[in-house]
């Protein structure tokens, strides 16, 4: 091999190595929009009308300026999960009592559902709002995803049994997303079709953006990942100022960071 050819190969190898290093250290620098103190136990997120949702002493609240709405249900224990996709029908899930409550936009109770009273045996470990007066429900008794019609009090199973334990789940109106304990990412639509979306990075907390993108935290650092085939699992570190945080929430290019003392909002452009 000639010296010229060896030099060309060396330069190509160096360029590839440099690109790989850059890829491993890609960063996103968000723009600070606002921050304010917050005496709450858990920050849930914002809706499209600018209201924030949070939990303090197991009291669920909705706040914007001087407007404050609250809801508390002592008989059902602690709130496990909150779904604010539809601000007119908010879902509070109480896993310990196998129940959920639907609230209107002023946090008045619309209906209360006890899955234990359903003719089809249900032990719910995941609940979220779906379409056409239905809720997504993962039934641990048969390890299947189903849809519960809260007007008719009817439940139907839509998926085949899942083979692995659910580590994280998130829903939208048409899709139930979950990540299993092996970090495999799946989706199930309202017709029961299950799709494999790939494997995600190891994480502590997660926020799914779409079928290819998500934000996750690991060791008090925050990252954006894109697992599309074209980009081959790009990972960007998000450079936030907070050294520790309890929760984050992403919606409409606003990244909210909830710490023990405040909520910080950043403008962030996803690559």
Image: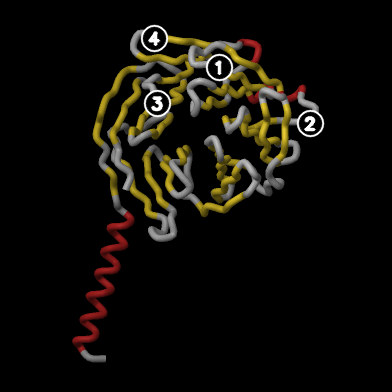
Q: Are marks 3 and 4 in contact (CB under 8 Å)?
A: no
Name the secondary structure under disc 2: loop
Reading the image, the residue beneath label 2 is: 120
Q: Earlier in the sequence, mark 2 or mark 3?
A: 3
Residue 58 x/y as whole percent: 53, 15
Q: CA distance from mark 1 to mark 4?
A: 17 Å
Left or right relative to 240: residue 195: right
Q: Earlier in the sequence, mark 3 or mark 1?
A: 3
Reading the image, the residue beneath label 3 is: 48
> In front here: 132 or 261?
132
Q: Are marks 1 and 4 in contact (CB under 8 Å)?
A: no
Query: Which residue is painted at 35% across and 24% down in the image?
Result: 263
Q: CA distance from mark 2 to mark 4?
A: 41 Å
Question: Is 144 located above or below residue 266 in the figure?
Answer: below
Q: CA distance from mark 2 to mark 3?
A: 36 Å
Reading the image, the residue beneath label 1 is: 103
Pointer 4 local density, CA inside 10 Å: few below 14, some 14–19, many at least 20 = few
Name the secondary structure under disc 1: strand
Q: CA distance from mark 3 to mark 4?
A: 16 Å
Residue 219 x/y as whole percent: 41, 40
Q: Earlier in the sequence, mark 3 or mark 4?
A: 3
Circle number at residue 67: 4
Question: Is 11 located above or below residue 161 in the figure?
Answer: below
| Closer mark to the observer between disc 3 and disc 4 | 3
> In front here: 49 or 203?
49
Q: Earlier in the sequence, mark 1 or mark 4?
A: 4
Circle number at residue 122: none
Name the secondary structure under disc 4: strand
Q: CA distance from mark 2 to mark 1?
A: 24 Å
Query: Which residue is painted at 36% across and 20% down in the image?
Result: 261
Q: Are marks 2 and 1 in contact (CB under 8 Å)?
A: no
């Amino acid at each position: 091999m000639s010296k010229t050819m060896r030099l060309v190969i060396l330069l190509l190898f160096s360029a590839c190595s440099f690109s790989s290093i850059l890829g491993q250290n890609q960063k996103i620098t968000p723009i600070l929009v606002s921050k304010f103190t917050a005496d709450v136990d858990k920050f849930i997120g914002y809706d499209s009308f600018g209201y924030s949702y949070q939990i303090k002493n197991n009291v669920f609240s909705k706040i914007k300026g001087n407007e404050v709405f609250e809801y508390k249900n002592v008989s059902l224990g602690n709130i496990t999960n909150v779904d604010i996709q539809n601000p007119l029908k908010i879902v509070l899930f109480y896993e310990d009592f196998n129940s959920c409550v639907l609230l209107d936009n002023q946090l008045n109770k619309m209906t209360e559902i006890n899955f234990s009273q359903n003719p089809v045996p249900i032990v719910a470990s995941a609940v979220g709002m779906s379409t056409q007066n239905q809720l997504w429900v993962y039934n641990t008794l048969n390890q299947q995803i189903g849809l519960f019609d809260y007007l008719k009090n009817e439940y139907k199973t839509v998926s085949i049994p899942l083979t692995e334990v659910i580590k994280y789940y998130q829903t939208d109106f048409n899709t139930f997303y979950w990540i299993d304990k092996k970090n495999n990412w799946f989706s199930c639509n309202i017709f029961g079709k299950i799709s494999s979306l790939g494997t995600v990075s190891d994480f502590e907390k997660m926020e799914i953006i779409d079928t290819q993108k998500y934000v996750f935290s690991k060791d008090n650092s925050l990252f954006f990942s894109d697992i599309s085939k074209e980009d081959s699992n790009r990972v960007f570190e998000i450079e936030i100022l907070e050294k520790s945080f309890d929760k984050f929430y992403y919606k409409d290019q606003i990244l909210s960071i909830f710490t023990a003392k405040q909520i910080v909002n950043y403008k962030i452009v996803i690559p």
